[in-house]
């Protein structure tokens, strides 16, 4: 156990616990809504709190370009700037740099050079700079700068990415942080057993406050993804939080929780919301579908979110069809509530030793629905 993290219950490989940060406690497993540009799109801080969110994620890449980490720091840090006084995790910016591959210019031992998606200007990110930006933002959890290649690269490239990730993690570990800030390491290595194993050993050796599995959910098939998490998660230090970067579909969340993951994030709930799709326990509903025109039911009869407690599918479909902001907002609120509720349910199930049953019920119910065209797999690349 670390002083920041306590495992309070286990069920097989799954764990329930509490992560203590400078801005409060995070019960785990925890789903982290993504506030890319300092906002979970369309959803205010009080609403997030009411939905059950205990921690949100901010993106270093975007915030460092717009409005700039110095601006955020001058206005009191990211918590004050975005009006959220709960825990915040910031990524290192590396994921965006490496996923926007057409903007990559050069990767060397010291850092990475790329072109900004905002103005095309050359920009540079090093471990020290990633640490400095995250210290300026004042997040509760800072992530190491890592090299995250897509799933289909040659093994040599995967190996080099893991090597650089360790080199950079060592430097990030030594860089200054803001008082009370936790720093998490990231293991790479794709789905390659030897490379992943070695990367985990090297990152664990650096004794970070928590550890993440990066470089998964980047285009590999789902069976391989979960198989890898199954043997890789238990290799991460047991007394520290384990973060799976980039998963947010209901089945995926339960699969990684079952394998011992404590934290995860995804833009899926708000992204789907903005495209007119609701995530429900009976599968996804595409509100653009004509079958909802006269549907008086709520999105989900068992949901207590602001959308389901007041509005019909027909009304929300009308709003979506007319591109009304309220429609997209209601769907985002509902989708977040569903995933936060699902995660809380999994936590309760772990505490009572019935996670397998809980998962089977959720997955069976989802599987009963006819496969709709909108159920395509979302990966971290679509962040
Ligand atoms: Zn709802």
Image (spheres, rainbow, N blue to C red):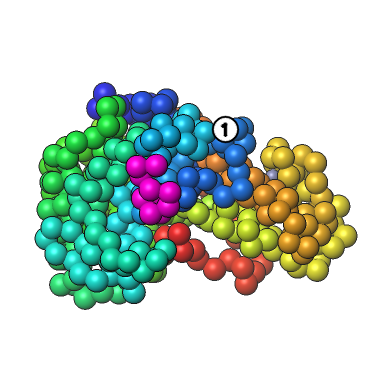
175 vs 363, nearest the viewer: 175
Whether 96 is drawn above or below 335: the answer is below
On the image, the x and y values in percent for residue 272 come to: 60, 59
On the image, the x and y values in percent for residue 295 come to: 84, 57
The residue shown at (32%, 62%) is: 97
SS under mark 1: helix
Whether 93 is drawn above or below 29: the answer is below
On the image, the x and y values in percent for residue 282 come to: 67, 55
Q: Quadrant of the N terminus?
A: top left
Whether 203 is drawn above or below 354: the answer is below
Magenta residues: mostly which secondary structure?
helix
Residue 176 appears in the figure: yes
Q: Is residue 8 left or right of residue 144?
A: right
The residue shown at (39%, 42%) is: 71
Residue 175 placement: quadrant: top left
Magenta segment: does it hold 66?
Answer: yes
Magenta range is 62-71
Magenta segment: does it hold 311?
Answer: no
Residue tagged 1: 49
Q: Is residue 378 left or right of residue 214?
A: right
């Amino acid at each position: 156990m670390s002083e920041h993290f306590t495992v309070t219950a286990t069920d097989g490989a799954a764990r329930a616990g509490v992560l203590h940060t400078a801005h409060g406690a995070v019960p785990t497993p925890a789903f982290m809504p993504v506030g890319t540009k300092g906002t979970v799109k369309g959803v205010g801080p009080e609403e997030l709190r009411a939905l059950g969110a205990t921690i949100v994620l901010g993106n270093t890449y975007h915030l460092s370009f717009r409005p700039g980490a110095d601006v955020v720091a001058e206005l009191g840090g990211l918590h004050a700037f975005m009006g959220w006084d709960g825990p915040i995790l910031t990524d290192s910016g590396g994921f965006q740099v490496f996923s926007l591959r057409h903007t990559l210019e050069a990767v060397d031992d010291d850092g990475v050079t790329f072109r900004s998606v905002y103005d095309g200007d050359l920009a540079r990110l090093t471990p020290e700079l990633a640490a400095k930006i995250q210290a300026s933002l004042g997040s509760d959890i800072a992530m190491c700068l890592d090299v995250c290649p897509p799933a289909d690269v040659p093994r040599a490239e995967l190996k080099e990415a893991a090597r650089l990730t360790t080199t950079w993690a060592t430097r990030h570990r030594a860089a200054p942080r803001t008082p009370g800030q936790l720093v998490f390491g990231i293991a790479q290595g794709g789905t390659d057993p030897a490379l992943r194993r070695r990367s985990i050993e090297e990152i664990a050796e650096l004794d970070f406050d928590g550890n993440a599995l990066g470089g998964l959910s980047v285009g590999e098939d789902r069976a391989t993804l979960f198989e890898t998490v199954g043997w890789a998660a238990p290799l991460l230090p047991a007394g520290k939080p384990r973060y799976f970067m980039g998963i947010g579909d209901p089945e995926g969340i339960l699969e990684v929780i079952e394998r011992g993951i404590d934290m995860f994030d995804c833009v899926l709930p708000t992204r789907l919301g903005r495209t007119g799709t609701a995530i429900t326990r009976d599968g996804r509903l595409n509100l653009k579908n004509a079958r909802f025109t006269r549907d008086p039911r709520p999105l989900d009869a068992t949901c207590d979110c602001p959308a389901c407690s007041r509005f019909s599918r027909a009304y929300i479909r009308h709003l979506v069809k007319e591109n009304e902001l309220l429609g997209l907002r209601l769907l985002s609120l509902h989708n977040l509530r569903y995933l936060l509720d699902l995660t809380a349910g999994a936590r309760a199930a772990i505490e009572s030793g019935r996670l397998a049953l809980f998962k089977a019920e959720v997955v069976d119910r989802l599987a009963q629905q006819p496969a709709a065209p909108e159920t395509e797999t979302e990966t971290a690349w679509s962040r």
